[in-house]
């Protein structure tokens, strides 16, 4: 890790809004469930001299950077190398039964996206990996493209990437695989997609963007674990505790929105039923009627914040 790397990091997304909703005070304990490079945690710990943070991240490289950045806070900060879905397990290990706030920023960190070897970006030619935890035994993106059927590849690209030409892309991937030349690198995949899609010059994003996003979500099972994580986060909050989550994908935002609505007591039963059978119970108050988004000033400073949406709730009991 380059010297002083932790001191030259981007300002975290929607930071002012996050602090305004979390309202950190002295002696309160917060969980940063997606610690990343430690930007949000740094701000929370700096907000009051006696706040504490339990950090969680599955990326060992990011943890190393965050530790360097946050070492100035001493014992007020501790970190666990886990997936955010393990929040209850982590808090048990940290010996906290309940906490005052939970934060999750579900975006890919700058360290991951800017890495020339992790395979998250087609800006670099690298092995098609995309695992948030590079030390795990989970399948890589290349493994998925090697083993899944054309139908399954197309489904992932369409559902997770909202790519309307998913079947054409999947067909090209499988044709290349059947020719004995499987897609193994980011450059190979990006070039294949460009040839398959051929979008016009006016398109604002690279034609491979949606497919890369879809594969990253599939590799890391990001949507599969999200609803339960939201429920677990609310469960570990004290009364009047706050939960803040930042998403970067419409499907993520939809899952968070609907889960918070259910926890706020909204009934999702079919309208013709004479009474509620879904067990709707009001456990939280939603603090964001509509998701908060980045200001024009932040968008200019950090273009990656353009798709960020923040939702928050307050624990009632």
Image: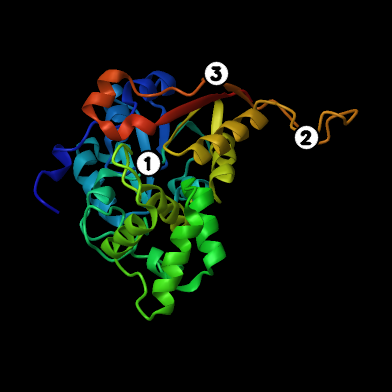
In the picture of the structure, the residue carrying the numbered disc 1 is 107
Evaluate whether residue 236 shows in this view.
no
The answer for how far apart the CA atoms under marks 1 and 2 are is 32 Å
- Which mark is in front, 2 or 3? 3
In the picture of the structure, the residue carrying the numbered disc 3 is 289
In the displayed structure, 96 sits above or below 86; it is above
Residue 298 in the image, given as x and y percentages of width and height: 27, 23
The answer for how far apart the CA atoms under marks 2 and 3 are is 23 Å
In the displayed structure, 232 sits above or below 28; it is below
- Numbered mark located on residue 279 in the image: 2
Q: Residues within 10 Å of mark 3 (few under 14, many from 20)?
A: few
**Would residue 146 appear left or right of 268 to someone viewing this image?**
left
Q: Residues within 10 Å of mark 2 (few under 14, many from 20)?
A: few
Residue 73 in the image, given as x and y percentages of width and height: 24, 35
Discs 2, 3 touching: Cβ within 8 Å: no
Q: Secondary structure at mark 1?
A: loop
Q: Residue at position x 48%, y 54% from top?
A: 166
Q: Secondary structure at mark 3?
A: loop
Q: Residues within 10 Å of mark 1 (few under 14, many from 20)?
A: some
Question: Number of callouts in the render?
Answer: 3
**Image quadrant containing the N terminus:** bottom left
Q: Residue at position x 57%, y 41% from top?
A: 232
Among numbered discs 1 and 3, the one appearing first in the sequence: 1
Q: Residue at position x 46%, y 50% from top?
A: 93
**Would residue 266 appear left or right of 57 to someone viewing this image?**
right
Residue 25 in the image, given as x and y percentages of width and height: 38, 21
**Image quadrant containing the C terminus:** top right
The answer for how far apart the CA atoms under marks 1 and 3 are is 22 Å
């Amino acid at each position: 890790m380059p010297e002083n790397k932790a001191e030259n990091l981007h300002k975290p997304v929607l930071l002012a809004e996050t602090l305004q909703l979390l309202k950190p005070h002295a002696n309160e304990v917060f969980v940063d469930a997606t610690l990343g490079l430690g930007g949000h945690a740094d701000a929370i710990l700096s907000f009051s001299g006696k706040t504490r943070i339990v950090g969680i991240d599955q990326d060992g490289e990011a943890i190393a950077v965050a530790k360097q950045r946050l070492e100035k806070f001493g014992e007020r900060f501790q970190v666990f190398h886990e997936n955010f879905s393990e929040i209850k397990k982590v808090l048990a290990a940290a010996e906290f039964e309940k906490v005052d706030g939970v934060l999750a920023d579900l975006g890919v960190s700058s360290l991951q996206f800017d890495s020339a070897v992790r395979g998250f970006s087609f800006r670099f030619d690298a092995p098609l990996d995309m695992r948030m935890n590079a030390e795990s035994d989970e399948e890589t993106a290349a493994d998925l493209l090697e083993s899944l059927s054309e139908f399954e590849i197309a489904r992932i690209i369409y559902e997770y990437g909202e790519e309307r030409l998913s079947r054409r892309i999947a067909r090209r991937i499988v044709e290349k695989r059947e020719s004995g030349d499987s897609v193994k690198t980011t450059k190979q995949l990006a070039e294949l997609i460009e040839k398959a899609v051929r979008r016009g010059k006016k398109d604002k994003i690279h034609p491979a963007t949606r497919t890369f996003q879809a594969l990253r979500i599939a590799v890391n099972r990001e949507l599969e674990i999200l609803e339960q994580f939201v429920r677990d986060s609310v469960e570990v909050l004290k009364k009047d505790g706050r939960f803040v989550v930042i998403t970067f994908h419409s499907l993520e935002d939809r899952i968070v929105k609907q889960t918070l609505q259910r926890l706020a007591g909204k009934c999702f039963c079919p309208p013709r039923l004479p009474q509620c059978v879904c067990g709707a119970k009001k456990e939280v108050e939603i603090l964001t009627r509509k998701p908060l988004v980045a200001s024009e000033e932040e968008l200019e400073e950090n273009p990656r914040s353009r798709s960020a949406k923040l939702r928050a709730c307050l624990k009632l009991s």
